[in-house]
Amino acid sequence: MKSALIKLALATTTAFVGITPAMAQSTATSENGGLEEIIVTAQKREQSVQDVPIAVTAVTQESLKANRIFTVNDLGSIAPGLTVRPSAGGIQVPSFTIRGQNSFGVVAGSDKQVSIYLDGVYISSPRGSIFDLPDVSRLEVLRGPQGTLFGRNATAGAVSVTTRDPSGEAGVKLVGSYGNYDAYRLRASVDLPQMGPFSAYFSFVRNYKRGDIRNAGAGTVWDRSLSTSTYLKKTAVSPDYLGTVDSYSYFAALKFESGDFKLVYKYDRNDDAGTPEGTAITYYNPAFPLLGSSAGLVGPILNALYTSQNIYLNPGNRRPDTVLNSWVIPREQHVQGHSLTATWHASDSVTVKNILAYRESRVFAPSSIDGTSALTFTQAAVVPFATLSAISTLGAGFFALSPAAQGATIGQFAAGLQGFVGGRFLTTASEASSISKQWSDELQVNYTSDKFQATVGAMWFHSNDEAGGPDGLQNTISVTLPPLPASGLIRRGNEGRYFNKATSLAAYAQLEYKLDEQVTIIGGARVTHDDKTSRFRWDTLNSNGTITPRPDIVPDPYKATRPSFLVGVNWKPNTDTLVYGKWSNSFVSGGSVAGISFKPELASSFELGLKSDFLDRHLRTNLALFYVNYKNFQQPSSTTSPEAVAFLNAQYGNIGTALSSNLSTFVQQALDVRAKGFELEVTALPARGLTIGGSLAYTDSEFININANFLATQGGEYLPYVRPNWTGSAFVSYDSKPLFGDAFINFRMDALYTSRTLISATPNVRLAQGFPADSIWVPANVVLNGRIALKNIMIGGAKTELSVWGRNLTDRDYMNSNLFLPFGTAVNYGPARTYGVELGIEF
């Protein structure tokens, strides 16, 4: 049996290593010349990654350097089956795809399906969770439901980031890089010497890169002085370039260690004034059929605006050089966190850990959703607008007039509109803001013996969030009639602001028992109690410019207690092979948005895995097969979509029409998801200094049990989208022999592959409406990253490293996100090719 399994693993490895390679694991070797053991904490304790019965990829220091991974948003395809892209709008929300699941969490009051942890602390708010981390020592991507140990909101997986502890050895490390697009990154880290039981270090990073798309609306001034918000700049200017990175990061750690007790305090802060990626308009239909009955009146206004000025239409999939996004201003993002981790080794068998933490984030990020905001209101649009005004004012009486009288009436309205010429017109734009605060405390106890392993714990979590447009202003602005003044003063609007509080209590236990030296059985359970309250403020702008307060929408509190379970069996036929099988489940918490309630999303998964080292640890193969059902799938939807509003109206009466101008996003829950597939990772050491590897993942997902109202309002069609069937990666790393002293050259190249991806839920409907095929499918793409470094150069007692690096070396164009609007299609793109040099000095 053992030999048969080994032959199967070898055959699998041979079949895949020739066509696509592998995992983003370490290129370092152990003392015996084999692959180095990688330690992870995927089960809340330190273990070799090869002993963990979880599909987990450990992204180590070499891979972090070579791929310039500074935030979770840089992880795309680095782990099998994983894609990451920023959500549209520049609000720094990562969108993860793992095992057929799309995780956003952009709807205020909702949660996400992929949890992010920093030093064991759950980051609840997705807004602002793309931030620079200067001292990452290890990054783990866990795939599949992680409900037992990581809790709710991990139905698809979890990303765990671990920063380093103080070493107690005095030292200074300086790293500076310079690249194209005026990019520079400076990192300084100072470790203090051990002083009694205390040790500490401090790090600072300045990161800047000019955007890769020019903004034709640069220099436009916006005035938000009518907002009562105290945390945002009242006057801001649209930037010259879009996609700019502009951040300052600070990190500090203080450790107290005495005997068997250790206490580590960590503080991180990130201030970001970058800009969202450029948004291009790629298509519009002059008939504007998605406007419905209003197309005959609004359509002529839009056509006049689109044809009387350059909107930088960008058909196809290629990244544009220039877009018109004058509405965009640099975002205001401030993220910080405190954590205090106490660890007590009570005995050789018992370890007790407690993690106390507080985090907060504040984000304000206006974005041009339509790719044209803001247009100049031109003379050509006056008559179409006057026609709309006349008919809206007189109603049916307008059509009772003679043609001459109709013309005279339109002329009167046109004369009154002359003062708006030169003003600013928005079709669809966002000025999203959010404030999030969270407190948490988790107690963990680990017990280890020869036969028995137990991990038990309890957690308390509380969050207080608010999101929406700035106080007094509208969040998502659609068709500004009349236009905004040329001064840029943003008038008050139909305000929509969410206020959410959540408290969660959980207790968990995972037990492992060795039946013999080869077989271990695992059982785990977690019970979570959620208590959520919400409030939605939706004041209305009147035609005379005043605001009418409406009663807040205050739904009943959401209270629920739910369990999560895990049952598994591990078989170790030898010390270098692990075969595991398990069933597990998890859930994403339910809740309510503006009175639109949604149920918990439930995941139930079967997984069979093989982890094996061959040839004296010169060949490593990890394979996972999975089958997972997601029930009550939580999908974010925008009220800018006519189909979404129609669904709300069909499902809840006319709530969609009533809320559409106040409510920007909601949780649309109308179907289930079923996914199955495999994930393979391979790493090999074929020769001295040479490491090659790769990964390949396939996911087949389908939507099932679709709500009848949803099908009817979507045109009777709904297909999996933003879920690539295939992802893969490949890397090769080579360390030369010493050239002089201990100095050597390291070469590393990574290729990250994503297959052709559907980005429309209803492609046939969109094609029938005239949308081009290239706005519905993202072609397959391969992104190449590389780095060549001369390492271990000793200069006057300082260890120096000089490198050249590049990302997206072939300058591959690809869409990151696509929005179908009543006015056309708007697209965001992946970043252009970047390259540069880097110098590091350590002493």
Image (spheres, rainbow, N blue to C red):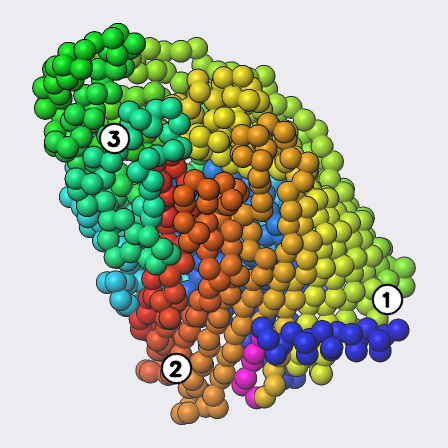
**Among the two numbered marks 2 and 1 on one chain, the one whose residue lies closer to the N terminus:** 1
Above or below residue 704? Residue 245 is below
For badge 2, the amino acid type reads Leu
Q: Report the span colored magenta.
A: 688-693
Q: Residue at x 40, y 11 (%)?
A: 550
Magenta highlight on residue 585: no
- Image quadrant in which you'd find residue 634: top right
Whether residue 190 is situated above or below residue 488 in the rendered picture: below
Give the SS element for disc 2: strand
Please, what is the three-letter code of the amino acid marked with disc 1?
Gln
Instruction: Calculate the distance from the C-alpha at mark 2 to the C-alpha at mark 1.
Output: 45 Å
Label 3, label 1: how far apart the Cα atoms are: 74 Å
Q: Horizontally, is 700 left or right of 375 in the view? A: right
Secondary structure that dominates the magenta span? strand
Which tag, 3 or 1, sits closer to the chain's start? 3
Q: Are marks 2 and 3 in contact (CB under 8 Å)?
A: no
Q: Secondary structure at mark 1?
A: loop
Mark 3: which amino acid? Answer: Pro
Looking at the picture, tell me which residue is in the foreground, 166 or 645.
645
Q: CA distance from mark 2 to mark 3?
A: 62 Å
Taking depth in this image into account, of 36 and 417 the one nearest to the observer is 417
Q: Which quadrant is the N terminus positioned in?
A: bottom right
Tell me the quadrant of the picture where the C terminus can be found. bottom left
Left or right: 704, with 481 as reference point: right
Residue at x 44%, y 61% (from the top left corner): 69
Q: Determine contact: label 3, label 1, CB under 8 Å.
A: no
* Residue identifier under label 1: 518
Return the disc, 2 or 3, that comes first in the chain's sequence. Answer: 3
Of the pair 512 and 573, the residue shown nearer to us: 573
Residue 790: give its label: 2
Label 3 residue SS: helix
| Mark 1 crowdedness (10 Å alpha carbons): few <14, some 14-19, many ≥20 | few
